[in-house]
């Protein structure tokens, strides 16, 4: 299993970044306040992007997904858990539509695919670290 050599942790809130930094003891983990609609990273620069509990509250999730797509490598993995949704609800279907529009694969029912890009196994069963 390969561990990440460098991890960027971002948030729109300076207060959340300060809280996250408080107990950090890793030289690999770097924190910064960023705008998810205009990230300062090069195209295709990340193997994994995790955006947790944000896509359902941003005003234009399709624009956020387009920016994520830009910084994610072609064979990269997007992990985007959004806990307060139901896959078959109207909002779940709208979210799936924007994920598809941004170029991320999905399965029937409108839920994002939960498989490792490297081996095709379900994320929880893959031998490679996704987090």
Image: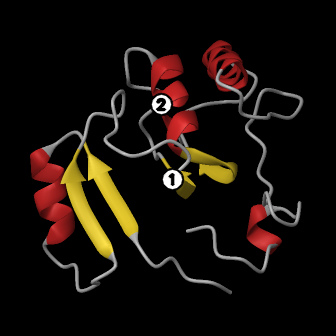
Q: Is residue 8 left or right of 11 when viewed as pictured?
A: right
Asked whether residue 80 appears in the rendered view, the answer is no
- Residue drawn 71% across the image and 33% down it: 104
Asked whether residue 66 appears in the rendered view, the answer is yes
115 up-or-down from 100: above or below = below
Query: Which sits earlier in the primary sequence, circle 1 or circle 2?
Result: 1
- Residue drawn 66% across the image and 12% down it: 90
Residue 45: assigned label: 1
- Residue placed most toward the observer, 77 or 86: 77
Label 1 SS: loop
CA gap between label 1 and label 2 equals: 12 Å
Category of crowding for the residue at label 2, using alpha-carbon neighbours closer than 10 angstroms: few (below 14), some (14–19), many (at least 20): some
Q: Is residue 104 left or right of 64 when viewed as pictured?
A: right
- Residue drawn 18% across the image and 79% down it: 23
Residue 67: assigned label: 2
- Residue placed most toward the observer, 53 or 5: 5
Across and down, in percent, residue 1 comes to: 68, 87
Across and down, in percent, residue 31 comes to: 23, 61
**Between tags 1 and 2, which lies in front?**
1
Across and down, in percent, residue 99 comes to: 66, 26
- Residue placed most toward the observer, 70 or 8: 70
- Residue drawn 11% across the image and 60% down it: 18
Residue 75: assigned label: none
- Assign the C terminus to one quadrant of the image: bottom right
- Residue placed most toward the observer, 33 or 111: 33
37 up-or-down from 52: above or below = above
Label 2 SS: helix
């Amino acid at each position: 299993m390969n561990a990440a050599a460098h991890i960027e942790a971002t948030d729109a809130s300076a207060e959340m970044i300060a809280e996250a930094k408080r107990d950090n003891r890793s030289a690999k983990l770097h924190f910064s306040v960023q705008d998810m609609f205009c990230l300062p990273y090069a195209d295709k620069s990340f193997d994994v992007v995790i955006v947790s509990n944000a896509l359902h509250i941003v005003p234009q999730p399709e624009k956020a997904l387009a920016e994520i797509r830009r910084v994610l490598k072609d064979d990269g993995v997007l992990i985007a858990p959004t806990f307060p949704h139901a896959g078959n609800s109207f909002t779940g279907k709208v979210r799936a539509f924007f994920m598809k529009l941004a170029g991320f694969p999905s399965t029937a029912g409108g839920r994002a695919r939960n498989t490792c890009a490297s081996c095709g196994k379900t994320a929880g069963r893959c031998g490679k670290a996704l987090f």
